[in-house]
Image (cartoon, grey):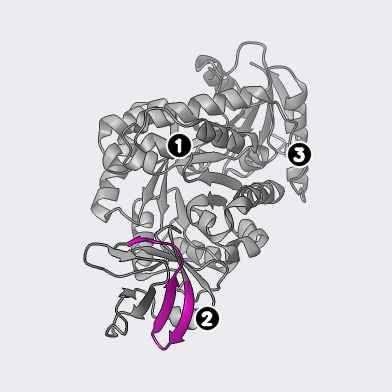
């Protein structure tokens, strides 16, 4: 069976904490495991990373880890039970150190809320289910009129669509979680509620200061991020279309348009892109997805996203392995349906980029061809993946285990850890033998070869054609 181009990300949680389930997820096709720091403890994360590495090693599979920072979110405080709200009720949102000033009053964790809002602004609470219109603002207090009936529980998330908030980029908890990510040698670290490129650069700076080479994933979750999309994509290593909060921050009918815009911008600039949230939400409880969910997954694959991500489906759902198997089936079917030409939108600026385009075009023009990349830091393999070859799989061979795991997310790339010889011809012979042994190429299949590894006797400015 040929490798699937679209990569699958699974969020781990109570439903998927055992070694047996982690192993089954890898066997079903999971390539990256997400550790959600909104819920995970440090001890649990360390345990799961050990399990991931043990099980992936026993299966001879390259599997990466993604630490997802909680980020600076605005939440309500604790209430007893749930507060019943009727349309027209007035609810006070106050700083935690203030006494209630209204019959219906709840604290928040953000003392600057009153400074960011204006009268008439819309507040959305509890994943957008409760709507409030700001009626009055006083120091430390915001009075909102209920627009939609419902019940408000404790620690509910507050969204302020289209409003620039002055929250810190990283919280104290995020700082501790960044140190954990460095300590466990995470492959990817995602920054939540990123609002501009400087936020992405700050996370990278903190990771590098701790000696961590993890790739930075920027989560696009609000209108500020959409406004600064190009600069965020340029600064990041990968981008996540985080449709949960994003779907609250923008009008629902705009969400598919914004998703396509993000995917297109990543294709133009050359960055990995993940489509996330609610892909198979019904499978948290049910063994089969809805038809609409199947179509949603298919659209992400048609858009040539590098990866698609499961959240609650695998962290707390009843059918985590079946969810991965379902994504695998849909992605494989859609990838067979179309064979697009290589990307024409990627902006190429250097001779090396033009070299890789030549290799991709050659592989595209030959039946049953594949692309073999010898890479020291993953640069050429990233470029090849960004060019989106329609037919040819990309086999990336690198001696660096961290580089190999960093390439796991790239669309159509199968990374292999491979010790390089000083003799380029011997490297090629051994690599082709490996691909034949694994059934990835057959004898006589054309293989286009490029390299960014400095070795005597090999011209890194050349594109070679060999046969399996």
Q: Is residue 411 left or right of residue 339?
A: left
Query: Considering only order in the chain, which callout, 2 or 3, is on the residue closer to the N terminus?
Result: 2
Tell me where residue 300 appears, x and y as whole percent. Answer: 59, 38
Which quadrant is home to the C terminus? top right
Between residue 49 and residue 224, name the one nearer to us.
224
Going by the picture, which residue comes out furthest to the bottom?
A: 139
Look at 45% across and 73% down and name the residue there: 168
| N-terminal label among 1 and 3 | 1
x, y percentage for residue 180? Answer: 33, 57
Disc 3/disc 2 C-alpha distance (Å): 57 Å
Compared across the picture, whether 3 is left or right of 402 comes to right
Label 2's element?
loop
Residue designated by label 3: 355
- The residue under label 2 is 119
- The spot of residue 58 in percent (x, y) is 33, 27
Tell me the SS state at disc 3: helix
Residue 397 in sight in this render? no
Q: Pointer 1 and pointer 3: residues touching (CB < 8 Å)? A: no
Image: magenta residue range: 133-151
Gap in Å between the C-alphas at discs 1 and 2? 38 Å
Front disc: 1 or 3: 1
| Residue that mark 1 sits on | 280
For marks 3 and 2, give the one nearer the viewer: 2
């Amino acid at each position: 069976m040929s490798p699937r181009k679209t990569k699958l990300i699974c969020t781990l949680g109570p439903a998927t904490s055992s070694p047996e389930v982690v192993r089954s997820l890898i066997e079903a096709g999971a390539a990256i495991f997400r550790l959600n720091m909104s819920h995970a403890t440090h001890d649990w994360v360390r345990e799961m990373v050990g399990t991931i590495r043990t099980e992936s090693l026993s299966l001879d599979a390259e599997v990466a880890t993604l630490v997802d920072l909680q980020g600076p979110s605005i939440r309500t405080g604790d209430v007893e039970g749930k507060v019943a709200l009727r349309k027209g009720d007035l609810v006070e949102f106050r700083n935690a150190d203030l006494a209630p000033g209204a019959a219906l009053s709840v604290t928040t964790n953000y003392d600057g809320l009153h400074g960011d809002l204006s009268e008439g602004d819309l507040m959305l609470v509890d994943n957008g289910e409760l709507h409030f219109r700001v009626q009055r603002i006083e120091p430390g207090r915001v009075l909102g009129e209920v627009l939609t009936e419902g019940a408000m529980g404790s620690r509910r998330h507050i969204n302020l669509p289209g409003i620039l908030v002055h929250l810190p980029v990283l919280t104290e908890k995020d700082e501790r979680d960044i140190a954990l990510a460095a300590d466990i040698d995470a492959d990817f670290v995602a920054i939540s509620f990123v609002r501009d490129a400087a936020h992405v650069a700050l996370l990278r700076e903190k990771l590098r200061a701790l000696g961590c080479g993890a790739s930075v994933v920027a989560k696009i979750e609000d209108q500020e991020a959409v406004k600064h999309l190009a600069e965020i994509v340029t600064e990041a290593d990968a981008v996540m279309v985080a449709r949960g909060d994003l779907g609250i921050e923008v009008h629902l009918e705009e969400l598919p348009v914004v998703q396509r815009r993000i995917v297109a911008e990543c294709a133009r600039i050359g960055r990995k892109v993940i489509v996330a949230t609610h892909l198979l939400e019904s499978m948290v409880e049910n063994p089969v997805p809805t038809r609409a969910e199947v179509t949603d997954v298919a659209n992400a694959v048609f858009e040539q996203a590098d990866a698609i991500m499961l959240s609650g489906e695998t962290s707390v759902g009843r059918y985590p392995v079946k969810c991965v198997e379902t994504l695998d089936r849909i992605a494989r079917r859609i990838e067979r349906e179309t064979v697009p030409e290589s990307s024409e939108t990627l902006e190429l600026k250097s001779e090396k980029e033009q070299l890789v385009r030549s290799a991709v075009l050659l592989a595209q023009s030959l039946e049953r061809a594949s692309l073999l990349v010898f890479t020291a830091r993953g640069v050429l393999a990233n470029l090849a993946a960004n060019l989106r070859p329609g037919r040819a799989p990309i086999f990336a061979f690198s001696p660096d285990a961290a580089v190999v795991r960093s390439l796991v997310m790239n669309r159509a790339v199968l990374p292999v850890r491979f010790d390089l010889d000083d003799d380029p011809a011997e490297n090629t012979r051994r690599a082709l033998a490996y691909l034949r042994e694994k059934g990835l190429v057959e004898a006589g299949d054309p293989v286009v070869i490029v390299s960014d590894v400095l070795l005597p006797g090999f011209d890194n400015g050349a594109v070679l054609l060999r046969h399996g």
